[in-house]
Amino acid sequence: MSDIILETTDLTKHYGGVHALEGANFALKKGEHVAIMGDNGAGKSTFVRQITGVEQRTRGTVKFDGAEVNFAGPIDAREAGIETVFQTLALADDLNVPDNLFLGREKTKWNFLGPFRFLDYKAMRDDTMAGLEKTAVKIPNIKNTIRNMSGGQRQCVAIARTATFASKLTIMDEPTAALGVQETEQVENIIRTLKEQGESLILVSHNMRQVFDLVDRIIVFRRGRIVANLRKEDTDGQDVVAYITGAKTGAEFEGAA
Amino acid sequence: MSDTSQGTGGLAFDKSKRQWPNEINVFGALILIILIFEGLGAAIMGQSFLFDSNGRFDSIFNEARLKIIILQVSIIGIIALGVTQVIISGGIDLSSGSVVGAAAMIAMSFAQVAEVNGSPNPKAVFGPAWMDLPIIVPIFVGLAIGVLAGMVNGMFVAIAKIPPFIATLGMMVSARGVAKWWTSGQPVSFPTESYGMIGGGMMPVVIFVVLAITFHIIMTQTIYGKHTYAIGSNEAAARMSGINVGRHKILVYAIAGMLAGLSAVVLTSKNLTAQSGMGIIYELDAIAMAVIGGVSLAGGRGSIIGTVIGALIFGVIISGFTFLRLDAYYQEMVKGAIIVGAVVLDQWRQQRAAMKA
Ligand SMILES: Nc1ncnc2c1ncn2[C@@H]1O[C@H](COP(=O)(O)OP(=O)(O)OP(=O)(O)O)[C@@H](O)[C@H]1O
Ligand SMILES: [Mg+2]
């Protein structure tokens, strides 16, 4: 077995004439934390959507945990062990915290009742408490609907959801974009916890300080292409910005963008 | 990392932060409306609305009026239970009244007796081989017609992606057509004695209450209920979470159709006849009951309990106008105003919810 958890080869996505993602070759080691940076519209979220099966890629291959995968949808990806916090939060406003954490994978009893099988509210509540405890997320009352929560609290719920379920790879697309200082810190703490537990992570972020604080390696996207692959020790903020803006392009990616 | 003073893992349980269930507001409205009619009754009519002011009954209540209210409410209430689920899932069902008409005509045809007072049934739809059937046959037919209509609605919405308003409007017109076509507009009468018992006496109320309890449990305790709320709340999130949204919607519309079919069985059994015009405007009454009861037309919010209280409010208002001897014309006008008023109230609630979010 190799120690590579995720590998993409020539991963490409075109939306009609828009080449949102072009020939992305990317590899992630087990337990490694990698940041993806790049300007708005550079193709970061598109990259995430191809890996997680939210969309079907135009071209290329994805290898996950040693085997080539073709996820038909995000559920396939989740079942394979990829937990994702999407940029647009997939939360149901009118449901409470445990309901959202377990949406689509509810704990049930009396399963012979098929679609009318009963929810095991107690088990889900207990697991929610454990998950929130693990991530140190503060929520006034988990029985309240998400609608009445602040943007930060919602984000925490979405992140607690990924942290509650053991996974092989966690992907977060701009998890702190809408958060205040304290909430950002909470999310960063969750990410550190994941690192301690040896879980692999892809973090899409625009926040330079955060990226240098948290990850081992930085990938830069520009106009749909990967233009740099930088170990944290070998680079600095100015350098990364140069790649983002196009002032510089990594030697091995020359001619790409 | 965690603020232990706030409890485990930083979790704080603040009872004051618990949400106030909307059903309590709706129930308050019911009490308020009853009090208004009591006041008007005392002022205008010189008698009580719901209480026994003439010593006619054994209890303190005007049992006759209470009975009329709940009986009136029950048959449309059965439809409203299904409509509630459809609206919570983010849809709408305008076809239920017409489905009642079609199911009433067809189910009744399988409930007829061969002979009336020694001569052949003058309203016979089928030959004698298809008459005097066991009660289960017309019930099954009524439910099946409803399920079929509901599934067609659901498939247009879920697979063809036609807006629910349009899909069910089409069904509204078509199902009414079926009801008229079935006997070329002739009423279908003379059911078997056992069929007549389904909706006899207070049976409609019993059926309504049993169904309301059943669907209350289903909506609050089962995966079907949870996914219905989830889809109405955020369809994209539901899909992302792995819920088979299309299949679920078809199921929701099919259940709503089934309840409309059942309502048709109860109604025809109560009236001992089926007419092609049965159930006209029931869909709007049912929607009004749900919306009055706090079911949001935006989806995701509302409950069976709310709809039951909404149905009672609806029944109390209609009965209250009869009590005040208001002309039937005025009653219809007021009913229209109630429906629009309920939607306005819903819009206002939605705006308030959006402001909070
Ligand atoms: N469904 C779509 N149809 C057509 N074009 C799309 C679609 N989704 C994304 N795009 C385009 O693809 C490009 C990449 O978008 P993407 O969302 O991946 O950017 P991003 O790097 O995540 O940006 P941001 O930092 O703003 O989130 C953009 O030009 C965008 O307009
Ligand atoms: Mg993005």
Image: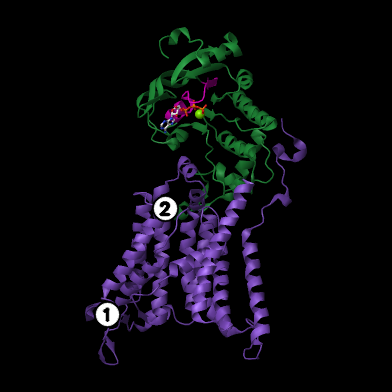
Q: Is residue B177 above or below residue B203?
A: above
Q: Is residue B183 magenta?
A: no
In the picture provided, is A215 more to the left or to the right than B106?
right
* Residue A256 point in image, percent of width and height: 41, 13
Q: Nearer the viewer, residue B9 or B315?
A: B315
Label 1 marks a residue whose chain is B
Residue B249 tag number: 2
Q: Is residue A46 magenta?
A: yes
In the picture provided, is B326 more to the left or to the right than B100?
right
Closer to the camera: disc 2 or disc 1?
Answer: 2
The residue stretch that appears in magenta? A30-51
Chain B takes which shade in the image? purple
- Indicate the amino acid at tag 2: Lys
Residue at numbered disc 1: B131
CA neighbours of label 1 inside 10 A, class few (<14), some (14 to 19), many (20+): many
Q: Nearer the viewer, residue B88 or A168?
A: B88
* Position of the C terminus of chain B by quadrant: top right
Residue drawn where x is 54% and y is 29% of the image: A172
Residue drawn where x is 53% and y is 29% of the image: A173
* Residue B296 point in image, percent of width and height: 54, 57
Q: Is residue B339 above or below residue A166?
A: below
Chain A takes which shade in the image? green
